[in-house]
């Protein structure tokens, strides 16, 4: 991949550009870094502008780029490259209009109020009306702009902050996609129960999960990108990586990311593992849906149009009238001509703030989404290629108390871990025949014994444990004694009968009766 995260297939992503522009785009895709995509364009005459330049803003920084970004010479570089700036290139007409107003104002006021020639000689007004005499100069008090400038500043700050928040949310959505695709691949690999599964089947199952994960983020990228830029590359990549039928189903879907997410959920359900572990993996897939919905909201809902339109009108009128307010401030310059470059610079800076907000408002065509998708594909495939125990540390057999995470064993050899068979049906418990009635033996007279010494509570519990189970205490799968209440038994000898435990309602009635 190019270091700046541009599209790999320049021919498809730049198909709508002119031939000369296509050459520039291709060169930059190869040579430029994430630091500044316009740095090598000084000797190029046909620099792309407008929508065509947005693809050059898809920067992905590395450590070397950050060093250049913090360089002490950055101000010199930025000033030297000011005429290659994409932001200023988009402002040519607006700045030109304001500069033209300032130029007209200087010439008009010189003609109606007098002017000074190159030799320093002052001349009277040239333009005069026959009956009215001299025409008035065009000026406005600067206080009008001083009063309104705070309001304009607040509107510009709110515009840029809101746009940056939209860009930041879109970038976080893709960051969540990157994080949870790796999380999903890791859990699928580690939770996969390979017992009774061939290595080939395991590799195929995990590879399918990785491809479905990539298919979702790639479909999301296409969903958020212009059709003329990404449709051809999207189809090509799907047919290259996915089975033909799966690729066709995604392409034919009305909502492609939903179809890709459905395939991902199905691939997770096909994995042999406990349903509780599948639920954990599905949680990561659910986050993908949340990120998609958040991105769709950003794409379809701009900053309220009445706000952006009012700001654009406010700023345009304010700058178009600004030369009238600043004219007298440049009276010390020759014929007030210093007003023209000053207005050009001021209008460029203020229009630039509004332009930055407009460019950030729709963030997806300036985010390196193709680089994100390619990295997700590479990382998921790498994670799925790993196997438990391939780091040289063998895996321990599952403990008996953890058996509830897996199916019930069909056989449990005494000298090894349980053997699991996922193909055979679960064993059916055999019916137990009713016990034959037992005749009661005559009760022998009981001799009255002397009162025994008190027995400690712990010793009494130990003695009573075997009697509670009518024999030796029984252990559960986890090695714990079965302490559940025994089944009720009705015997001819009342001393051998066990009554059923009362229900909660019966207990309340008994307690009320005793009270």
Image (cartoon, rainbow, N blue to C red):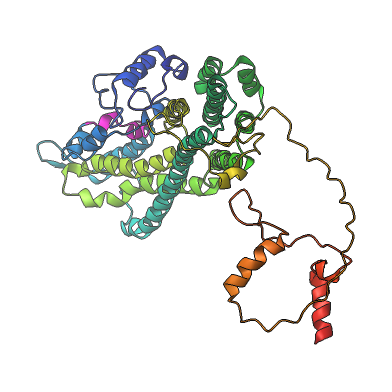
495, 417: nearer the viewer: 495
Report which quarter residue 147 is drawn in: bottom left
Is 315 on the left or on the right of 297, as rendered? left
- x 28%, y 39%: residue: 344
Give the position of the C terminus as an image quadrant. bottom right
Residue 487 picture location, percent across and down:
79, 60
Looking at the image, which is closer to me, 339 or 381?
A: 381
Which quarter of the picture shows residue 427?
A: top right
Magenta-drawn segment: 81-92
| Percent of width and height locating residue 2 | 34, 23
Q: From the viewer's perspective, is 122 left or right of 387?
A: left
Asked if 207 appears above or below 299 in the picture, the reply is above
Q: Is residue 400 left or right of residue 451?
A: left
| Residue depicted at x 53% and y 43% | 399
Indicate yes or no whether the magenta region holds residue 88.
yes
Q: Position of residue 24 (x, y in %)?
A: 33, 17
Picture mark count: 0
Q: Main secondary structure of the magenta part?
A: helix
Q: Position of residue 291 (x, y in %)?
A: 54, 41
Specify whether residue 133 is in view. Answer: no
| Residue furthest left in the image | 119
Residue 154 visible within the image: yes
| Up/down of 155 relative to 416, above or below | below
Between 234 and 349, the one lying in front of the other is 234
User: In this rendering, is residue 483 above or below 118?
Assistant: below
């Amino acid at each position: 991949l190019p270091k700046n995260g541009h599209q790999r297939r320049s021919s498809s992503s730049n198909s709508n550009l002119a031939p000369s522009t296509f050459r520039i785009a291709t060169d930059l895709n190869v040579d430029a870094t994430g630091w500044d995509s316009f740095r090598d364009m000084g000797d190029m005459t046909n620099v792309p502008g407008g929508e065509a330049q947005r693809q050059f803003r898809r920067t992905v920084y590395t450590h070397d780029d950050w060093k250049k970004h913090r360089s002490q010479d950055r101000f010199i570089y930025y000033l030297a490259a000011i005429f290659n700036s994409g932001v200023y290139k988009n402002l040519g007409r607006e700045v030109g209009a304001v500069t033209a107003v300032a130029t007209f104002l200087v010439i008009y006021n010189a003609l109606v109020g007098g002017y000074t020639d190159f030799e320093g000689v002052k001349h009277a007004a040239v333009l005069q009306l026959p009956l009215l005499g001299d025409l008035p100069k065009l000026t406005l008090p600067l206080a009008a702009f001083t009063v309104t400038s705070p309001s304009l500043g607040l509107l510009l700050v709110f515009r840029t902050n809101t746009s940056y928040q939209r860009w930041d949310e879109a970038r976080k959505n893709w960051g969540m996609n990157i994080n949870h695709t790796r999380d999903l691949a890791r859990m699928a690999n580690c939770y996969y129960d390979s017992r009774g599964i061939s290595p080939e089947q395991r590799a195929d199952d995990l590879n399918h999960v990785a491809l479905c994960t990539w298919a979702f983020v790639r479909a999301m990228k296409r969903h958020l990108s212009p059709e003329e830029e990404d449709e051809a590359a999207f189809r090509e990549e799907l047919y290259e990586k996915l089975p033909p039928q799966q690729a066709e189903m995604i392409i034919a879907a009305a909502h492609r990311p939903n179809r890709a997410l459905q395939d991902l959920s199905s691939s997770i359900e096909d994995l042999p593992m406990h349903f509780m572990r599948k639920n954990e993996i599905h949680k990561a897939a659910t986050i993908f849906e949340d990120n998609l919905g958040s991105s769709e909201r950003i794409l379809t809902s701009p900053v309220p149009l009445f706000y952006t339109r009012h700001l654009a009108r406010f700023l345009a009128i304010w700058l178009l009238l600004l030369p009238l307010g600043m004219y007298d401030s440049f009276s010390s310059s020759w014929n007030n001509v210093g007003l023209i470059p000053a207005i050009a610079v001021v209008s460029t800076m203020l229009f630039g703030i509004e332009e930055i907000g407009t460019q950030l408002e729709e963030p997806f065509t300036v985010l390196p989404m193709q680089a994100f998708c390619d990295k997700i594909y590479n990382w998921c495939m790498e994670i799925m290629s790993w196997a438990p125990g391939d780091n040289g540390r063998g895996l321990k057999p599952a403990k008996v108390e953890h058996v509830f995470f897996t199916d019930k064993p069909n056989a449990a050899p005494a000298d090894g871990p349980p053997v699991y068979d996922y193909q055979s049906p679960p064993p059916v418990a055999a019916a137990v025949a009713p016990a034959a009635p037992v005749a009661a033996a005559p009760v022998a007279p009981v001799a009255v014994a002397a009162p025994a010494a008190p027995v400690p509570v712990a010793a009494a519990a130990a003695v009573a444990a075997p009697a509670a189970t009518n024999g030796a205490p029984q252990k559960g799968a986890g090695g714990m004694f079965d302490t559940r209440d025994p089944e009720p038994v009705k015997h001819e000898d009342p001393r051998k009968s066990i009554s059923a435990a009362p229900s909660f309602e019966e207990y309340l009635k008994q307690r009320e009766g005793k009270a």
